[in-house]
Image (spheres, helix red, strand yellow):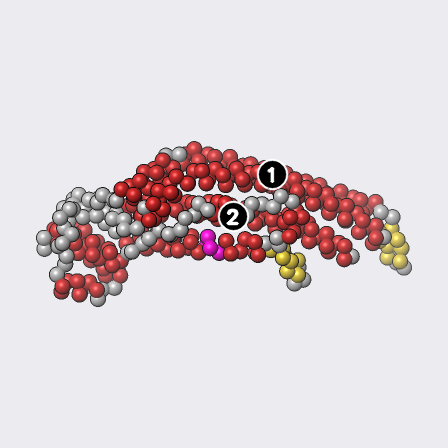
Amino acid sequence: MKTVGMIMIVVTLFCQLAAEELIKKDLMPFFDNVPPPPATAQEAFTKITINDAGTIRISAEKVYGSLEKEVKEMETALAQQMKSASMAAAPPGAPAGTGNQMPDPEMKKKMQQMSADEKMKMAMEMMKSMPAGYMTQQPESPPIQNALAEWQKVYNTLGTEYQQSVDWQQEDIRIDEENKKAHGAIGKWESAEIEKLPQISSGEMSAPDPAKVKEVKLQANDRHIAQANQNLKQIGELWKKISDHKKTLYTPFYQKLVAADYASGYKNFSTFKVLSDAQMMVIKDISHLIETSRNACEESAQWLGERQEIEKQ
C-alpha cells in the first residue's frame, strides 16, 4: 500500500475516533458575574438558607448553586473531551496533496464496522510503518494561529504566575489562621465569663443564672460577628485582587479564541491540546473564585444563625 494511501486511512480512522471540541462559551463575563464575598456577616446571612434537621446547616446554594453547576458541567465536559483526545492521540496532519486520496469504498466500509479499539490498533500499526517525519503539522487558519500566539504570551508568564499564586495562597492561609485564632480567643473569653457567674442552687444541683449566661453568649456572639466582618474585609480584598488579575491576564487570549470560533475545524491534535489546557486553566480559576466566595459567605453567616439559636434560649 502506498504511503499516501496509508496516511489517508490513518487520518480517516482518527477523524472517526475523535471529534473533540473546546467549550464554545465566552468565559470572561464569569469574572464579573461570580458574586464576590459579602461585605458583612449580616449581608451573608441574607444570602443563605438554614436547614435545621437536628444540626443547623447553613447553605448559600440559592446564590452560588446554579453558577457552580454551570461551571462544573463545563469542566466535566472539557475534561471528557481532553481524555478522548489523549486516547486518540490524533496525528498532527498529513502532507499537502493527499486531500483527494481517500480510502477505497471497501476499506471505508471495513473501518465503519470496526470498534474504537480496533480502529486505534489499526491506525497505530500503520503509523509505525510510515517513513519517519512523514506526518507533518498542517498550518492552522490565521484566527487559530492568533489564538495560539496570544496563549503563548500567557504561557510565557506562567513561572511568574505560579509564584504569584503561591504568594496569594500564603496570604489566604495567614488570613484564615488569624481568623481562627481570634474566634478561639472569643470562645475562651466566653467560657471564662460564664465561670465567673454566681451559681444558683436548685436542690443538689447548682448552675449559673440562664439569663446571665444568655447575656454573655450574646456578647460573645457580637464579638464573633465583628471578627467575621473583619475577616470578610480581608478575604474580599484578596478575592478582588485575584479576580481582577485573572481577568486581565486571560481577556486578550480569550478574545482571540472567540474570534477563532473556539478553534473549530482545527487541523492538528497539538492545537486542541494547547487550547484545551488553556481553557481548563481559565475554568478552574473561575471555579476557585466561586468556591472562595461561597465559603466566606457560609462561614460568616453562621454567626447570625448562632445568634438566632441563642435568642431562643
Local crowd size for mark 1, using a 10 Å CA cut-off: few (<14), some (14–19), many (≥20): some
29 and 103: which one is in front? 29
What kind of secondary structure does the magenta stretch mostly adopt?
helix
The number of numbered badges drawn on the structure is 2
Residue drawn at 35 percent across, 54 percent down: 81
For the question of whether residue 125 can be seen, the reply is no
In the image, which disc is placed on residue 255?
none
Q: Position of residue 256 (x, y in %)?
A: 35, 42
Q: Position of residue 273 (x, y in %)?
A: 32, 47
79 and 259: which one is in front? 259
- Indicate the quadrant containing the N terminus: top left, top right, bottom left or bottom right: bottom left
Q: Which residues are drawn in magenta? A: 68-72
Residue at numbered disc 2 = 34
Q: Is residue 234 above or below residue 5?
A: above
In the image, which disc is placed on residue 234?
1
Q: Amino acid type of disc 1? A: Gln
Residue 127 inside the magenta-drawn segment: no
Indicate left or right for 23 with 105 as reference.
right
User: Of tags 2 and 1, which is closer to the observer?
Assistant: 2
191 and 203: which one is in front? 191
